[in-house]
Image (cartoon, rainbow, N blue to C red):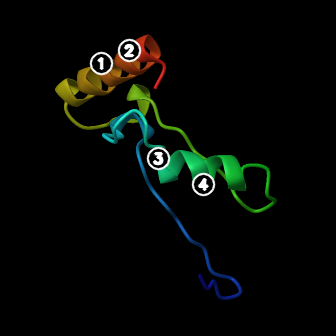
Amino acid sequence: TRLGFGSRVVVTGDITQIDLPSDKESGLIIVKSILMGIHGIEFVYLSSKDVVRHELVQRIVNAYKVYGERTKR
């Protein structure tokens, strides 16, 4: 990868929407474990409070959160 001086890169993903088989590891989770702690790299996590769309979308986000906590994904 290349990154010019003064540039910024944004990578987005949603770890609550990983649909890989349970024996496969998500690249999104792997990259987080590799890059966390490197100066200049930040990870931002959004919650249902950040959803400014329809109320139904907030309920869906909450449902995924509860499911993830229940299944330890």
Q: Are marks 4 and 3 in contact (CB under 8 Å)?
A: no
Task: From the viewer's side, name the closer residue of 61 and 19.
Answer: 19
Q: Residue furthest front?
A: 23
Mark closer to the chain start, 4 or 3: 3
Q: Are marks 2 and 1 in contact (CB under 8 Å)?
A: yes
The residues bearing labels 2 and 1 have C-alpha atoms spaced at a distance of 5 Å
Tell me the quarter of the picture where residue 31 sits.
Answer: bottom right
Residue named by callout 1: 63
Q: Are marks 3 and 1 in contact (CB under 8 Å)?
A: no
Residue named by callout 3: 26
Residue named by callout 4: 31
Residue named by callout 2: 66
- Dot 2 falls on a residue whose secondary structure is helix
The residues bearing labels 4 and 3 have C-alpha atoms spaced at a distance of 9 Å
Residue 26: x and y in percent read: 46, 47
- How dense is the environment of label 3, judged by Cα within 10 Å: few (below 14), some, or many (20 and up)? some
* Residue at horizontal 79 percent and vertical 50 percent from the top: 37
